[in-house]
Amino acid sequence: LTKLKDGLLPSIVSSEECKDAVSSDNNGCESSLSITVVGASGDLAKKKIFPALFALYYEDCLPKHFTIYGYARSKMTDAELRIMVSKTLTCRIDKRENCGEKMDQFLKRCFYYSGHYDSQDNFAELDKKMKEHEGGRISNRLFYLSVPPNIFVDAVRCASLTASSGNGWTRVIVEKPFGRDSESSAALTKDLKQFLSEDQIFRIDHYLGKELVENLSVLRFSNLIFEPLWSRQYIRNVQLIFSEDFGTEGRGGYFDNYGIIRDIMQNHLLQILALFAMETPVSLDAEDIRNEKVKVVRSMRPIQLDDVVIGQYKSHKKGGVTYPAYTDDMTVPKDSLTPTFAAAALFIDNARWDGVPFLMKAGKALHNKSAEIRVQFRHVPGNLYNRNFGTDLDRATNELVIRVQPDEAVYLKINNKVPGLGMRLDRSNLNLHYAARYSKEIPDAYERLLLDAIEGERRLFIRSDELDAAWAIFTPVLKELEEKQIIPEYYPYGSRGPVGAHYLAARYNVRWG
Ligand code: NDP
Ligand code: BG6
């Protein structure tokens, strides 16, 4: 429990720790928890939210008296919701002991209510249903807004006016996108705050729930060897790389209005960058960490158009299979210029990072699926052994790689001597490979984030001033790209992306890892 409260969640939250963590709510009084998944008929609810809730239930991380409600317009009975949900409970624990039994118990706690998102009457009926299950206990209520963003405010208005808790807490998890630029994001925040206080709003960025992103601060602040090197003095550049080996399949309608810069860079990659580059927080308290993140993001320069390369995937034939172009998606306009790939150079104007390029690269329909942080260190001054690398001096520098996914790992590329009588140098990895080091599976990011929201732990959620600072960096360049109708560089589906990304990196003497 102490570890949880200190913000040092262990890599796997064990059942015992969860039991402790959830039993002492509300000064020891028995409380109930009602979780409403708004938009329960949708993709995210099925794919991520219900499986994560089940995983938490399996691990005894949910309180004794909990009930889950699916809420959406689609007509469905409780039984139909349970059938729908049961199909996707193929989460990491489905091979475990008593899994079937646990699933049945879990599903019995799931109910469905069909209603409109803008109907206070419908939410009032949901409130009635909740009260029946809460049985007069202190009621804590969590709403997960898993709906398109144009519905957020209606749903929050109705939920807060007619279905918020009378005697416990009410919290709302909001999914991205949080607007599409500074203005729309500020308007969304203002609208939400008409009905909720900032500490009731849990803006989710699921990358913050990923194990290796969590580990970033542990690595930095609990090992002596990294922090002294964590500055312009020793680091040449930092790369934040996201790639997916599939296109926008099924989500083209959403994606075309946002593009890869808003979908991945402005949130997931920037959040990682902030954790990577922030100063040491005063404590592990959520506000202390978020204060440091805001400070570093506010020290960043808005991105210049010259420092961005955009691309869009085109159709490609390989091994007899034709992979579609982005614009082949029926929900995407044929003449869409929306980038499915982008590379950008970002800079932090503070004493620690002055002049160090932070290069981001994100793309869909590329050759692989991965997310990585690569830290390239400077050359060893007067390195006696440089000549052993000939002219390829890049090979002689250290590189720290944090592989967020897949196959989580942290490895450091070092130079060492090839064993033998001669003097030949080699590159090797000091490797923390999670699969080899830890036998337990890594929980899905949504499990951690849902548990944190239930616990009221805000450390991994985005505060509104963080969001403003994040949009301030990206909004000008996004506007310029759109106003100037910049044509993306087309790259074949399944390739390594536009060559322009290499020219951009080369301008800063960087080679992508
Ligand atoms: P969906 O498009 O599947 O929408 C969820 C539900 O909302 C639908 O089942 C539908 O329920 C209702 N809905 C959809 N469109 C409308 C509309 N125009 N008007 C009223 N209701 C509508 O969304 P996802 O489940 O994919 O995503 C939910 C949220 O999470 C979105 O904000 C999305 O951006 C975000 N997100 C999604 C990810 C994913 O992988 N899917 C990843 C990260 C974020 P019904 O018709 O039954 O009311
Ligand atoms: C979402 C994006 O936020 O993250 C998707 O909207 C993307 O486009 C997804 O596919 C990637 O998440 P993960 O956890 O699969 O890397």
Image (spheres, rainbow, N blue to C red):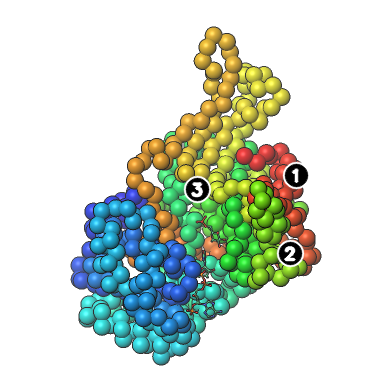
The residue lying at 66 percent from left, 51 percent from top is 320
What whole-number distance in Å separates the C-alpha atoms at marks 1 and 3?
A: 26 Å
Relative side of 441 to 348, left or right:
left
Judged from the image, the secondary structure of the residue bearing numbered disc 3 is strand
The residue lying at 53 percent from left, 39 percent from top is 401
Q: Which residue is mark 1?
A: 503
Judged from the image, the secondary structure of the residue bearing numbered disc 2 is loop
Residue type of the residue flagged with mark 1: Tyr
Q: Is mark 3 within 8 Å of ligand 2?
A: yes
Crowding near pointer 1: few (<14 within 10 Å), some, many (20+)?
Answer: some
Residue type of the residue flagged with mark 2: Leu
Relative side of 487 to 434, left or right:
right
What whole-number distance in Å separates the C-alpha atoms at marks 1 and 2?
A: 21 Å
Where the N terminus falls, by quadrant?
A: bottom left
Q: Which residue is mark 3?
A: 405
- Pinpoint residue 169: horizontal percent, then vertical percent: 33, 74
Front residue of 112 and 308: 112
